[in-house]
Amino acid sequence: MSDTINHALFGWYPYFCLTIFLLGSLIRFDREQYTWKTGSSQLLRRRQLRWGSNLFHVGILAIFGGHFVGLLTPIWVFDALGVSHSFKQGLAITVGGIAGVACFIGIALLAHRRLFDARIRNTSAPGDIAILLLLWLQLTLGLSTIFVSLGHMDGHEMVKFMNWAQGILTLQPAAAAYVADVNPIFKAHLLLGMTIFLVFPFTRLVHVWSAPVWYLGRPGYQVVRTRFATRRSPAPVPAVRSSAPTRRPAAAPSHQPAE
């Protein structure tokens, strides 16, 4: 890969994807919050949905957390904590492999459910199926990188990705040079990952912005119903109007003195 193509894909393309990711999410949050959903199919194949959804979400959260900490934590922090590059490499392979397999099984169940059940497929939007297949392909590439990583357990290859990710976020012009000579499967994994950020605002993935994480820090409260509030008030008795004609009372006799 020439330097120009490498710089375009790993130097400029990340900023394009991140810009669309941030602006698109903000605009959709502001104008189209009611579109952050997909057609419900919970009543169909509920057991497969439950297993697939739980495995996928647990796995993807672990993978995202591992990538976020592993790539964006400065190298000097690991050095200060005494964490060697080889240990970090082995930890990433082990934990990432377990989470990746769980996520892969979960998304395979979800994709099989949507593709091979005619009722669910007819109620699924094309974007729902497309993003599932895109994530499935990304997980396949990610799991495939494990076999390549086993060939260099010294961890120096991972340092290249850390320098690249941190260089992109700190606006370093030469960040693309860090991944110029890495294995092509890593480059495919990076490109597809950035593409997922690019299409993120236009898919159902935007629902992650609606995760109610703020409830974790909300002060607790208790709703108390008093006995007075729950006591039933007696029903008002309707006034009964009599149909008998009313008589005007006779005038009282006057006791005026005779003249």
Image (cartoon, helix red, strand yellow):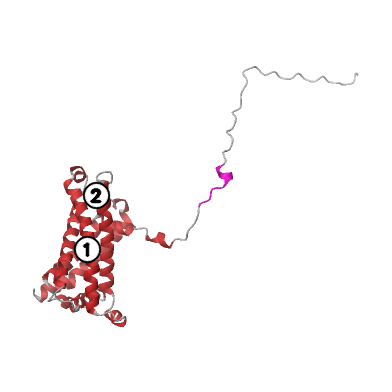
Pinpoint residue 213: horizontal percent, then vertical percent. Answer: 37, 60
Q: Is residue 181 magenta?
A: no
Residue 100: assigned label: 1
Q: Amino acid at mark 2?
A: Gln
**Left or right: 182 in relation to 200:** left
* Residue density around tag 1, few if under 14, some if 14–19, many if 20 or more, within 10 Å: many
Q: Position of residue 179 (x, y in %)?
A: 16, 75
Q: Which residue is mark 2?
A: 48
Residue 220 % position (x, y): 47, 59
Instruction: Identify the residue at image location x=17%, y=48%.
Output: 115
Quadrant location, the N terminus: bottom left
Q: For the residue labelled by badge 1, is the local secondary structure a helix, a strand or a loop?
A: helix
First in residue order: circle 2 vs circle 1: 2
Place of residue 36 in the rendered image (x, y in percent of width and height, measured from the top left): 29, 53
Along the viewing direction, whichever of 38 and 199 lies nearer the viewer: 38
Q: Which residues are magenta?
A: 223-230
Helix, strand or loop at label 2? It is helix
Number of dots carrying numbers: 2
